[in-house]
Amino acid sequence: MKPRTLFQKVWDDHVVVQEPDRPAVLYIDLQLIHEVTSPQAFTGLRERGLKVRRPDKTVATMDHSTPTLPKSLWVIDDQSKAQLDQLETNCKEFGVELFALGDSRNGIVHVIGPERGFTQPGKTIVCGDSHTSTHGAFGALAFGIGTSEVEHVLATQCLLQRKAKTLEVRLDGQLMPGVTAKDIILALCAEIGTGGGTGYVIEFTGSAIRNLDMEGRMTVCNMSIEAGARAGMIAPDETTFEYLKGRDRVPQGADWDAAVERWSQLRTDEGATFDKTVVIDANQLEPMITYGTNPGMGMQIGESMPTADSFENASQRAAFEKAMGYMGLRPGQPLLGQKIDVVFIGSCTNSRIGDLRMAAGVFSGRKVAEGVRTLVVPGSHDIKKQAEAEGLDEIFKDAGAEWREPGCSMCIAMNGDNLEPGQYAVSTSNRNFEGRQGKGGRTFLASPLTAAASAITGKVTDPRSLLLS
Amino acid sequence: MAKFTTLTSHAVPLPAENVDTDQIIPARFLKVTDKHGLGDSLFCDWRYLKDGSDNPEFVLNEAASQGARILIAGNNFGSGSSREHAPWALVGWGFRAIISTGFADIFRSNSLKNGLLPVEVNAEVYKALMEAVQRDRSTKITIELPTQSVTGVDGLEATFPIDAFSKHCLLEGVDQLGYLLSFDEQITSYEQQRT
Ligand code: SF4
């Protein structure tokens, strides 16, 4: 048989029908649901008198507009409440398992999928959410879809899909201390731009990827979409199996052994080719930060921002100038030392226990700078519990940070956690679009280490200056 | 789904690059449970001033934009989130086609499911159209789906790509879910094989 890429293998395995000149009918093994992008899909089913074809392959959570204030189930407004209620009604009516607000298994959709073991190598996974790419860290083919497609999958467990091209992003070498998975993916976004991966599925390869733990791999795949790629994948290996073993929804006993055997085949064959390859030297990576209003506008933290004449064409220059205007920053200046108002540590990119440990390592024995509001929002209740068992919550609180209930929170600012107009934030989330974290708010995307270090000094700070001191 | 064959209209020029779905429709408007009424929130943060009144400097508020069915926008339009609220808002305002040099994948797919045609042209054609429209806002552009062509600006005749299936669906108003449901038997046998 012709050598195949990991993507090709998972794709081939799920094609139900492929007619000439038509998109493939692709079987979906798991659909994740949340409150924001699903109501119209369930309404569509009702209007047509359809059922959910495979409730057993469908799981729902509440995360986007849920409150994060401790011990309160206060929901920001009537509309959010209506949306949450609607999800509950829909799940009940259609027989879909729901991890509702208050359930100990509740959390951000892309955090709980892997955590509970729903996410597995070789699966096709979709959700009405672009960061579904996260699950590709396990060697799944996972991508975001629109609400019409959510309805298609609910009704038929299938999607009409055209096959994407493949992009290999290879990272060999050793990350320097203070450089994290987040810096890898921000560096890729800066290198190829937010449209660079359009039309491709990325496979991340190389020793620097192999050396990442599952949480780091999820951070990398999570932001594949910020590089324009709908999905990012990493071939499963011992690290993957180790992470999954014993989780709620993975096969157990003899079935587990058979699964590992099967999953071990899921790697790109020797001799298989990609449509395109990008090589990044992991040894050269530095902590990264964004300065503009899309995730591609990033740089090494010690660099100066570009100036308009460093861009090739007029519309790029215009985009850059518009971004500088929104951000209230001067081209050509460094960002180090830029005063900030808020630090947000959380989101499906960086809210897992490893992220919190990293941040706690910086906060430990230090205090958040006066006037800086710092929010630490774990990705799920499991993570919250684990962090509290390790005493991380005490470290955050002692430092003067707020320790919150799980949810998307200030990543998308739908639940009442938001920036005020004009405020600057260092955020571990994934999008720095205008208004993303609150109308008029200005976001610098960075790693948990950089975010925590910046919280301590009140300014954009290279975490190595604190880690090494 | 609404059919699409030929569209002739004046256009709204929005030369910004990388217009993301958070700009098209900010997250605070995603709390709805139906698809309708989002047109008023399209480009909300650019379109309205702090007090809620129209921002006279934003192109959508200009008299010349009213009634336009075509948007011409900079490269990589629709990047970011998978929210189908973005095409719902664009269609809600009245757009039926967007001309750009590139579209984000999920946005393109969502648009096609809502009768909103993404017209991808090369940089040269984009520039010619953008300049013509900016010079004379009453310029009429014609988009013909059967021939996949864009005309209307002197001497300019351009084509755009679209896959055969999406084209067929738009021309005939095919309901994609209905099409998928017709494979029920194959889906069932696939499921049986796999278990
Ligand atoms: S944390 Fe942010 S990016 Fe992730 S699912 Fe929630 S809103 Fe989307």
Image (tube, coloured by chain):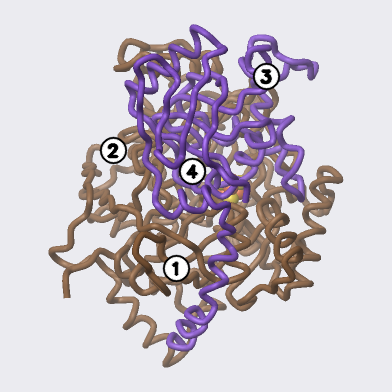
Chain colours: A brown, B purple
- Which amino acid type corresponds to the residue marked 1 in the rendered image? Leu
Q: Mark 3 or mark 4: which comes first in sequence?
A: 3
In the rendered image, which residue does mark 3 sit on? B66
- Which amino acid type corresponds to the residue marked 3 in the rendered image? Gln
Specify the subunit that label 3 lies on: B
Q: Position of residue A75 (x, y in %)?
A: 82, 48
The residue mark sitting in front, 2 or 1, is 1
Residue B108 is labelled as: 4
Specify the subunit that label 4 lies on: B
Residue occupying image coordinates x 71% and y 33%: B39
Disc 1 residue: CB within 8 Å of ligand 1: no
Residue A26 is labelled as: 1
Mark 3 to mark 2 CA distance (whole Å): 49 Å
Q: Are the residues under badges 3 and 4 in a single subunit?
A: yes
Mark 1 to mark 4 CA distance (whole Å): 19 Å
The residue mark sitting in front, 3 or 2, is 3
Mark 3 to mark 4 CA distance (whole Å): 24 Å
Q: Are the residues under badges 1 and 3 in a single subunit?
A: no
Mark 1 to mark 3 CA distance (whole Å): 41 Å
Q: Position of residue B122 (x, y in %)?
A: 33, 28
Residue A285 is labelled as: 2
Residue occupying image coordinates x 78% and y 53%: A83
Query: What secondary structure is marked by label 3?
Result: loop
